[in-house]
Image (cartoon, helix red, strand yellow):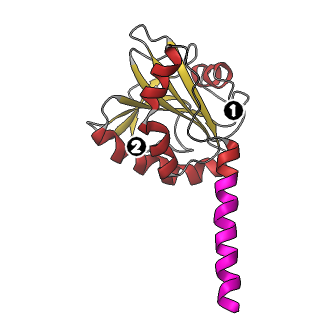
Amino acid sequence: MDIRVKRVDEKCSHGIYVYDPKQDLWILVQRDGGYFKPSGRGIYVIYFDNAKCSACRKYDGIWFPFVEKYSRDRSDINFVIVLCDWFARECSSSAASESFKHFDVHASPTTIVLYSDEKGEIKYQEKYEGVLYEFELKLILENFLERAEKHMRGEKVAPPISKESSSKALEDIVMQILKALIGQKE
């Protein structure tokens, strides 16, 4: 099962892929068995990708360049893709299907960022549904370790992006565009 690809896409085998920045390749690491488990201490960014998802194809255009660029500076972050055709229902990989179920993924694409200890036990995670833009990915990862450490100390933590903040930001942008268009016609 030595499958290595430049980009994971809808033609790839279902399963769990891990990015190797030294080779600049995605390596299929697991097709069978249970859900994805971190291999040790670190930050893991997991993209739950559905081959039949048009929004995922849009996200691919953001995700792959981001991973390639960001992983050069941040070797402490592990990038992972879990690929099925359509969530756990249409998937030829038991490991990918079980990962969709275990992480309760029902929107496509979904990105989960987690921190695990040296035993691979997940200590903190954040879940983001829908397409994320490069600035959002950077914002999420920028202080992720600090949020994880606060959480492990029992302190309250708020992710930097929520559905409410994203829709509010979009509303603000639309209003600025409308005001600019109206202002031009006056």
The residue mark sitting in front, 2 or 1, is: 2
x, y percentage for residue 114? Answer: 51, 25
Neighbour tally class for label 2: few under 14, some 14-19, many 20 plus, Cα within 10 Å = many
Query: For this view, does 30 lie left or right of residue 24?
Result: right
- Front residue (pair 27, 117): 117
x, y percentage for residue 142? Answer: 42, 39
Residue that carries the numbered disc 1 in the rendered image: 87
Residue that carries the numbered disc 2 in the rendered image: 67
x, y percentage for residue 14? Answer: 56, 31
x, y percentage for residue 183? Answer: 67, 85
Give the amino acid at mark 1.
Answer: Phe
Q: Give the residue displayed 57% in from the left and 34% down from the top.
A: 159
Point out the image quarter for the C terminus: bottom right
Relative to 169, say whether 32 is above or below: above
Q: Quadrant of residue 77?
A: top left
- Front residue (pair 177, 60): 177
Label 1: element kind: loop
Magenta residues, as a range?
Answer: 168-186
Tell me the chief SS of the magenta region: helix
Label 2: element kind: helix
Give the amino acid at mark 2.
Answer: Val
- Front residue (pair 77, 184): 184
Point out the image quarter for the N terminus: top left
Q: Which residue lies furthest to the bottom in this view?
A: 186
Q: In which quarter of the image is residue 105?
A: top right
